[in-house]
């Protein structure tokens, strides 16, 4: 495409970013391209449409110059300059981008580099007719979708429950292994901390729980929150003048507890680059989640009593009722007080803590089977688009928490391990032959 295309402007409907992504995902431009440096680029797997912050398509697979397909993300921009204008070169979320696709180049030779200065292969798309496609599914239907569509409701439910039981046992086994090393309390505490960080900050929350174990925080509940914020790196700087009066009072209290321990814990501080803040809803900011974790620590004995009793109704009520004198009314240290109280741990988060941590910890499979799923997150929607795209009863099936867990397990064991765009995936054949004994990568 020549420079004359720039005269038509990059704000046209055709060049709109969402439509460009939709046309790419629909395969309108094909899957074989020549890179700007003459590379032969083959899109083996278009990946999953990312509706959160970060690159446009994740879990893609791209072959360069006939080499083995490389898994990673694909970024699509209307203009080559958008890579720098949008800050992708400085954003660690774009470190695993394997291909930068753009349509307009009004600036001559520009390069796409990651924060670590790795050069990203570029492809310039041709101009084409407007198809009117806007939006689209998160993922393409897989080769297994017609196989699963032909199953009866009872058969597909049995398949999902088999996969869910496998997932449940794996989680329970992981908790037991951690418990054998660190004790049951620490195992549950670490699991709940990771749950507070889901989906983008599970690793830094896990590190936080490991570097500040429960037995240390329980020594002085008044210090616990200060230590958590100090080691996490979210504690405001000692100069608190820019904060609101209410926030200054709380931050000053935290600093009074943190200052005596600062030197001892400074080396354990979580690297700032590990925290993912882009695209977070204000109520889910990691700072609020750390405030909620400190409240859990303060009321740990009450929580453990309810867990020991398998009293999940009262446990849910307990978690819903957790409050904090500051974080019940604030999103971050720098936000104004909320107009009304905020749930310290939301209902969907509590459901995920039950499914992923509390029930596996107690081995209560029967409770999971009886649970209704409150909603469907992006991962389960993506998995449904991939495996159950042609079933009319998908919504009803995934209203069961266990079935949703089973679908996620199938997706992780097969789809996420596949770099062949389904061609080499064994699941369709396994699904044809049996509903049990499924094994992925």
Image: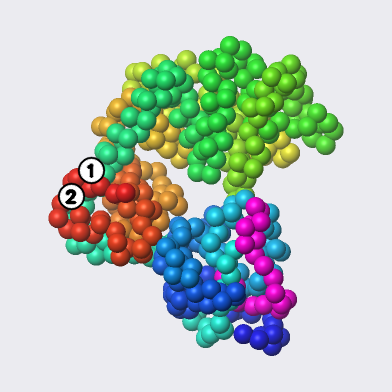
Q: Which mark is residue 34?
A: none
Q: Which mark is residue 162?
A: 1
- Where is residue 140? Give x, y as percent: 38, 65
Residue furthest to the left in view is 433
Labels 1 & 2 near each other (Cβ < 8 A): yes
Of residues 144 and 254, the one drawn nearer to the viewer in this rendering: 144
Residue furthest to the top in view is 219
Of residues 417 and 220, the one drawn nearer to the viewer in this rendering: 417
Where are the magenta residues, as a range? 101-119
- Where is residue 205? Give x, y as percent: 55, 33
Vertical position of residue 399 compared to residue 121: above or below: above
Q: Residue 113: which quarter of the image?
A: bottom right
Of residues 7 and 250, the one drawn nearer to the viewer in this rendering: 7
Neighbourhood count class around disc 1 (C-alpha, 10 Å): few under 14, some 14–19, many 20 upward:
many
Neighbourhood count class around disc 2 (C-alpha, 10 Å): few under 14, some 14–19, many 20 upward:
some
Q: Residue 287: which quarter of the image?
A: top right
Q: Check the picture and name the quadrant holding the N terminus.
A: bottom right
Question: Going 42% across and 20% down the picture, which residue do you hit?
Answer: 181
Query: Tag 2's secondary structure?
Result: loop
Q: CA distance from mark 1 to mark 2?
A: 8 Å
The answer to whether one can see residue 295 in this image is no
Q: Which residue is mark 2?
A: 435
The majority secondary structure of the magenta stretch comes to loop
Badge count: 2
Of residues 75 and 285, the one drawn nearer to the viewer in this rendering: 75
- Where is residue 425? Give x, y as percent: 29, 59
């Amino acid at each position: 495409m020549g420079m004359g295309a720039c005269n038509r402007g990059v704000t046209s409907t055709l060049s709109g970013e969402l439509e460009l992504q939709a046309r790419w995902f629909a395969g309108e431009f094909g899957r074989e391209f020549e890179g700007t440096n003459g590379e032969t680029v083959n899109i083996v797997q278009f990946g999953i449409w990312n509706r959160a912050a970060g690159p446009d398509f994740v879990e893609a697979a791209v072959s360069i110059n006939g080499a083995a397909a490389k898994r990673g993300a694909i970024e699509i921009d209307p203009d080559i300059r958008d890579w720098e204008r949008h800050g992708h070169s400085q954003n660690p979320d774009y470190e695993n981008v394997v291909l930068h696709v753009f349509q307009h180049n009004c600036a001559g030779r520009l390069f796409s580099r990651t924060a670590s200065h790795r050069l990203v292969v570029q492809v310039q798309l041709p101009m084409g007719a407007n198809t009117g496609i806007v939006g689209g599914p998160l993922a393409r239907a897989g080769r297994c979708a017609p196989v699963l569509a032909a199953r009866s409701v009872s058969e597909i439910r049995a398949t999902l429950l088999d996969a869910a039981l496998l997932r449940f046992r794996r989680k329970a086994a992981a908790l037991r292994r951690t418990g054998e090393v660190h004790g049951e309390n620490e195992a549950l505490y670490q699991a709940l901390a990771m749950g507070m960080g889901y989906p983008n900050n599970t690793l830094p929350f896990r590190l936080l729980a490991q570097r500040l174990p429960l037995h240390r925080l329980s020594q002085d509940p008044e210090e616990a929150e200060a230590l958590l914020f100090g080691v996490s790196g979210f504690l405001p700087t000692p100069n608190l003048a820019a904060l609101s009066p209410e926030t200054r009072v709380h931050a000053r209290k935290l600093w009074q507890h943190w200052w005596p321990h600062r030197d001892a814990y400074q080396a354990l501080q979580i690297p700032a680059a590990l925290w993912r803040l882009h695209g977070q809803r204000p109520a889910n900011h990691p700072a609020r989640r750390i405030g909620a974790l400190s409240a859990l620590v303060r009321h740990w004995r009450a929580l453990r009593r309810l867990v020991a009793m398998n009293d999940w109704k009262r446990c849910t009520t307990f978690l819903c009722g957790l409050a904090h004198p500051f974080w019940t009314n604030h999103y971050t240290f720098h936000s104004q007080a909320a107009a009304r109280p905020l749930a310290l741990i939301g209902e969907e988060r509590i459901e995920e803590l039950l499914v992923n941590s509390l029930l596996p910890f107690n081995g209560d499979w029967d409770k999971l089977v009886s649970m209704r799923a409150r909603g469907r997150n992006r991962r389960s929607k993506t998995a449904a688009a991939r495996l159950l795209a042609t079933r009319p009863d998908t919504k009803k099936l995934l209203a069961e928490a266990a079935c949703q867990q089973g679908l996620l397990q199938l997706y992780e064991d097969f789809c996420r391990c596949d770099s062949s765009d389904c061609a080499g995936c064994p699941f369709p054949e396994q699904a044809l032959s049996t509903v049990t004994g499924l094994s992925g990568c």
